[in-house]
Amino acid sequence: MTYKNKVSAILIAVVALLLIVVACDNSTEPEDNPFVGTWNLSNLNQDITLKTADDYTETLGFPSGYTIVDTVITWQNFQAMGVQGTITLKADSSFTLSGSLPIPNDTLGMPPTIQSIPADQGTWSVYAQQDSFELDGIFFDRKGELTLNDPENLTMISLVYAITDTHSVTLPTESTGYVEISVYDSTVTEIAFTKQ
């Protein structure tokens, strides 16, 4: 066999091998991901506990660790405020979110501020055994425990997350009007979405 024939035979073998590999490779077809699609906000509950982070015994009569807020805001409450939202989870792990979502009010006793979000965007991830979920967006950035209604026929996802931090709030008082105090915030939120 001449050198030219050997090269031609090798090229034919390589091309044939590539054709076999391409024919057997199904990885170019997208997998069916049950999370991909458009979801409507269908539940939102917040259990809010605020305790004084400092000792205000002399000025306000509250020792450190005194509970000044212990309340639950239900989905019915949020609906009455106009809260609603739609999120689209895409196959490339990006998402878009629009709607009207609550932002806690810094003045105690006041309802949350409802913020219109025309177009948030970012990435989403499902971790481990589909037990945690994360949204990393410009406005909405949360990670929490994930619950699925039916992994085989997914139509609802529920996310529970806790926020624990110390920050300042404004407390209305009869004598001085308003005073700023430091609180330890322990808020647990449950949020659910139903697939369109």
Image (cartoon, rainbow, N blue to C red):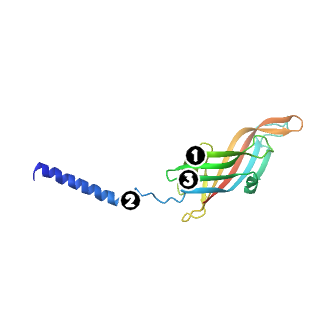
- Is 91 displayed left or right of 76 in the figure? left
Q: Depth check: give the residue in front, 10 or 98.
A: 98
Q: Depth check: give the residue in front, 110 or 88.
A: 88
Q: Which residue is drawn at 78% across and 49% down?
A: 70
Q: Position of residue 171 (x, y in %)?
A: 81, 39
Note whether residue 58 is visible. no
- Tell me, for residue 89, which label it has, or none: 3
Q: Depth check: give the residue in front, 106 or 98.
A: 98
Q: Where is residue 98 in the image (x, y as percent from the top left)?
A: 63, 49
Quadrant occupied by the C terminus: bottom right
Q: Which residue is drawn at 50% across and 53% down?
A: 91
Residue holding disc 1: 121
Q: Where is residue 8 in the image (x, y as percent from the top left)?
A: 17, 52
Earlier residue among tags 3 and 1: 3
Cα distance in 3D space between marks 2 and 3: 23 Å
Residue 131, located in which quarter of the rendered image? Answer: bottom right
- Tell me, for residue 15, which label it has, or none: none
**Which amino acid type is shown beneath numbered disc 1?**
Gln
**Which amino acid type is shown beneath numbered disc 2?**
Asn
Residue holding disc 2: 26
Q: Which residue is drawn at 55% across and 63% down?
A: 151
Graded by Cα atoms within 10 Å as few (under 14), some (14 to 19) or many (20 or more), the crowding at tag 1 reads: some
Earlier residue among tags 1 and 2: 2
Cα distance in 3D space between marks 3 and 1: 10 Å
Note whether residue 188 is visible. yes
Graded by Cα atoms within 10 Å as few (under 14), some (14 to 19) or many (20 or more), the crowding at tag 3 reads: many
User: Total marks drawn?
Assistant: 3
Secondary structure beneath dot 3 equals strand
Do the CB atoms of the residues marked 1 and 2 lie less than 8 Å apart?
no
Q: Position of residue 130 (x, y in %)?
A: 55, 57
